[in-house]
Image (cartoon, rainbow, N blue to C red):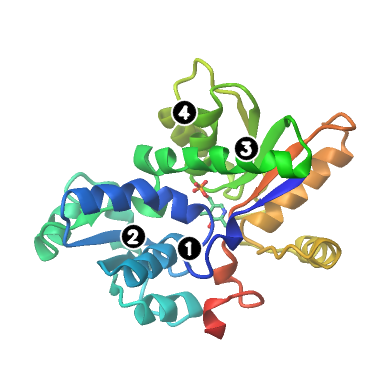
Amino acid sequence: MAVLRLDRIDPLISGNKWFKLLEHLRLAQHSGAAGIISLGGAHSNHLHALAAAGQRFGFATAGLLRGHAQENPTVRDLQAFGMQLHWLGYGGYRERHQPGFWLPWLERYPGWHAVPEGGGGPLGAQGCLLILEQARSQLAALGWADYDAWWLAAGTGTTLAGLVLAEQGAHKVYGAVAVPGDHGVAGNVEALVPSGNAVYELIDASRGGFAKADAGLLAFMRASEAESGVPLEPVYTGKALMALRERVEAGAFERGSRLIFVHTGGLQGDDRHAVSRLL
Ligand SMILES: *Cc1c(COP(=O)(O)O)cnc(C)c1O
């Protein structure tokens, strides 16, 4: 197994969220948008990446947050990066899929570009095409002529969809889904990839609920980190890698198979690793 360390592309704008933002940033710049507004939970890696990008590249950002005002390391970073925060409560946040949801916000922030929750949707997937290119350009350094499949954590499935689109059926993409079965990940992916040459499989890696960490997971992460030196977090990457190990142990892959595990980042939300807190 090779690990594509998207957690290492930048200390602040980390992981798959950078790729999911790429096309949105291009579009916003192209259309002369005055700023970028998006939404997410109080621990959102997506809002964190957007706010950090805003500070780095000098554009204004606003974040609509689920729930009621709270303090946590992610929220403190968002504020430090200069993002305008608005807490929608839980009911207000549930209305994000209603047709008129964005209207009042775009009246308040005229000419701003709105990015869907988590950076999802076709533009988000399109930015992830680049992940394939970046992995392939490094295969030779590993002495790999080819590989058999991809394995990565999935939340909305947007990053997985980008890889499936990029592969056009050449290699299978396994998504270890961090949310329980009723969250519509399969539907999201189907909406993003034409079924013709899409080769992927979704595996339930939620282990009893989104962001729920059991003792078995934490012990696996500690052992894996000690052995490999690759830091994990419990919400996505830890569960994805553990699900892969279970699959390997169950004999799902032939000996000698070559897998690319995408480290999708997310370490900012885990106090054991958070780089930004040290800056
Ligand atoms: C957001 C996130 C994911 C899920 O990405 P999707 O494109 O929504 O499937 C996976 N890993 C990490 C670390 C994330 O922050």
* Residues at circles 4 and 2 in contact by the CB criterion of under 8 Å: no
Amino acid on which the number 3 mark rests in the picture: Arg
The span from disc 3 to disc 2 (Cα, nearest Å) is: 32 Å
Whole-percent x and y of residue 136?
62, 37
The residue sitting at 59% across, 53% down in the picture is: 264
Residue 213 lies, with reference to residue 239, above or below; the image says below
The span from disc 3 to disc 4 (Cα, nearest Å) is: 25 Å
Whole-percent x and y of residue 24?
31, 49
| Residue 150 shown left or right of residue 225 in the figure | left
Label 1: state its secondary structure: helix
* Residues at circles 3 and 4 in contact by the CB criterion of under 8 Å: no
Confirm whether residue 184 shows in the render.
Answer: no
**Disc number placed over residue 190 in the picture, else none:** 4
Amino acid on which the number 4 mark rests in the picture: Glu
The residue sitting at 14% across, 58% down in the picture is: 106
Circle 4 or circle 1, nearest the eye: 1
Q: Quadrant of residue 219?
A: bottom right
Name the residue carrying label 3. 136
Check disc 4: other Cα within 10 Å, few if <14, some if 14-19, many if 20+.
some
